[in-house]
Amino acid sequence: MTETRLYRFGSPDQTDSIRHQPQPEKSWNSSVNLQYYQTFNQTNFSLSLNPESSIYGLGQNIGPINRRGATYRLFNMQARPQTPDCRAVNGPYAFSIIKNKNSCQGILIDCPAEINFDCGFTKPDLLSICIESLDFDLYLIEGIDVKDILKEYTSLTGKSYLPPKWAFGFQQSRYSYMNAKEVQEIAQNFRSRQIPCDAIYLDIDYMEDYKVFTVDPEPFPNFANFTKEIQGQGFHLIPIIDPGVKIESGYSVYEEGVSKGYFCKNAEGQDYIAAVWPSLIHFPDFLRAEVREWWGNLYKFFTDLGISAFWNDMNEPEIFYSPDSIQQLKKRVTELDYTAWRDLDPIHYKINLDRFMLNSETFYPDFFHQTPTGLVPHQELHNLYGFKMLQAASEGLQKLNPNQRYFLISRSSMLGVNRLAGVWTGDNSSWWEHLKLNIQMVISLNLCGVLYSGSDIGGHCGNADEELLIRWTQLGAFLPLFRNHTEKSSRRQEPWAYSSTATEIIKDVITLRYALIDYLYSEFLKAREQNLPFIRPVFLEFAEAGLDEINDQFLCGASLMIAPVIEPNARHRTIILPEFNWLYWCASKHDQYNFQVLAPGIHRLLVALNQIPIFIKENHLILLTEPEQFQGEKIKSEAIIIGLINQESSFTFYYDDGVTINSEIQKIKFKVSLKNKILEIEQQLLPITAKPPYQNFNFMIYDLAGNQYYKQISLSLT
Ligand code: MIG
């Protein structure tokens, strides 16, 4: 039913974004519904839109999941603050899905240059796509529904990155935990308060003068012992890695990079100089395989200490200034004429210096990458930079720890990153609006194959109040990357930073997440196997009309719908339950079951501050286990399986070893039936040699009238 055609324009360089390329078509098929024309350096496509068509995808942009009506600039930029007028942000994916009444189309463009999408902004019934290049691959995918297109997309770009299972635990971060003592206190607080947590982040201040692949021995004396101690308490340490290499003689990464010619060049062919945290730096030319190999090996510094978890930041790359731009700025300031109107910005009545100030973009034409066809300005390959930095990390880590999964998240991403790493959505703010944005971004990233993603819980910029942090933690508990992070000048944002009531509520939410981890992980493995998103928009699972508009509910896999409260002072939540009956759990504590059967339709529910509305789809099941303080803390012996059964359902629970790359997925398939008020369960191990993860499965099943049925299944663990 689905059909993919590749049209090659010009002679594009290989980006590695696409894993499996079909044979390119011999010529443009004029019956294709896209029109195009080219200028000397641009290609423009246009497509007429039906009134009812929606547009999805494009990665991590600011706006509703249905992109129709707005423009999107696919050009990797750190947007800060993330306001509705930002057209370019991190994580642009040149993959869009056009959903019509009875058909669907996927448009995928493999091109590292800037691409602009006008999704019916200029003309409501026209999608126009402007590619700043003449050399690219265009894939057109035809199918019946969105799932067809997504499956085809995944078979082109490759299966999602699979993190280690502990990555589904809670993670604590701050810019920065400044020294070993502070990290130890954080660790201590989690354990003594019995708030589950699997990871603590190290932000840029762990480095010596922001030199990448170093640790400052003053705040972190004996880093090896410190690492062991933290790891011994069941935490993973996640250091940050930035691309800029400090210019400092004697610093080995710098010396080696210079002597081997690994850095990006300026127009004169010298190593290009810009400034980021360490002040003056060079940028490694990650587009070259040998540079990636070198960089990947540098991770040995950490893997030797047993650290295999990282976040790659600043990799658009973000640039603060260059020596040249400062010179120009100085000159400009001396020339300012305070009597001249032209020196004022008439809108803001400030001195008009903007174009000399912080904007990474202005620097992109100034440096060059070495490619097989010669030096190419960064501008033309811009979107690739973060991707290639991740490729370096990914390849290096796989070589350093063969067959072990690594943890890797990135701020910058594009097509192809979906198989290498997860994504955090950059510097959001402690605004209520950003809870919704969090949902929109994670859904859209999932539609583009980035299954492991999340936003800074509590918000990065600014100060979260306690209700905001509570509601955001409740939302984050159902997204794959569950990380509390905030910036240097923000107030403390750890789970215990507010009132004791808030701490209790947050502790309960995190504990609930841990009770659900095996289920979430199972659904993640399943989504990955089926080439579908893990966090799904509601419309994807139901045929009902009008679901395209839902931006504040989402599905975790196929069975679980979440409707977080994302408004301040709200103690109610309106929810749309499509097509089926649902088992509603207004959850607060993981072991407090107050289930209720709800009919399809719209409901307005009472939701206290400590509660989050969770819905289990009819004839689907979820699984809960005893929560741990960190994963692997205990051997779990039991699981509780909960569901609403109308006659019969089957549910397959997936598990694997959670750490190795080639670990075989094991499955237990349960068939649950309710006939004449008798609950029957059949189970099957796949493969039959599979070793069940727990001995006892306690079924707690509801019928449509709300009656409860119990049954225990015991499996032999040998
Ligand atoms: O622009 O390393 O998005 O998570 O805390 C600031 C410091 C640089 C941006 C990241 C943020 C991180 C911060 N970094």
Image: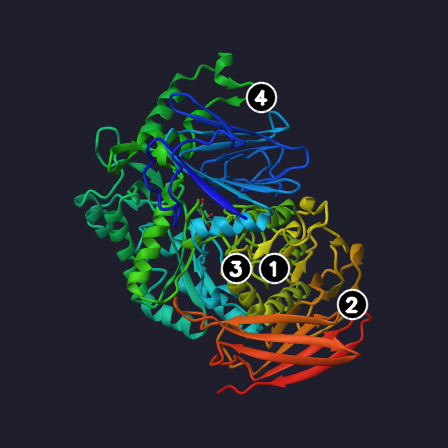
Question: Picture quarter containing residue 103?
Answer: top right
- Which is more N-terminal, label 2 or label 3? 3
Q: Please, what is the three-letter code of the amino acid marked with disc 4?
A: Ile
* Label 1 Cα crowd, 10 Å radius (few <14 / some 14-19 / many 20+): many
- In the rendered image, which residue does mark 3 sit on? 530
Residue 78 in the image, given as x and y percentages of width and height: 47, 40
Residues under numbered marks 4 and 3 in contact, where contact means CB atoms less than 8 Å apart: no
Q: Nearer the viewer, mark 1 or mark 3?
A: 3
* Label 4 Cα crowd, 10 Å radius (few <14 / some 14-19 / many 20+): few
- The answer, for residue 270, to whether it is visible in the render is yes
* Label 3 Cα crowd, 10 Å radius (few <14 / some 14-19 / many 20+): some
Image: 501 above or below 57: below
- Which is more N-terminal, label 3 or label 1? 3
- In the rendered image, which residue does mark 1 sit on? 556
Residue 592 in the image, given as x and y percentages of width and height: 71, 73
- In the rendered image, which residue does mark 4 sit on? 347
- Which is more N-terminal, label 3 or label 4? 4
Q: Please, what is the three-letter code of the amino acid marked with disc 3?
A: Gln
Task: Please name the residue shown 79% across and 69% down the image.
Answer: 704
Residue 250 in the image, given as x and y percentages of width and height: 19, 50
- Which is more N-terminal, label 1 or label 2? 1
Q: Nearer the viewer, mark 4 or mark 3?
A: 3
- In the rendered image, which residue does mark 2 sit on? 596
Q: CA distance from mark 1 to mark 4?
A: 46 Å
Residue 242 numbered mark, or none? none
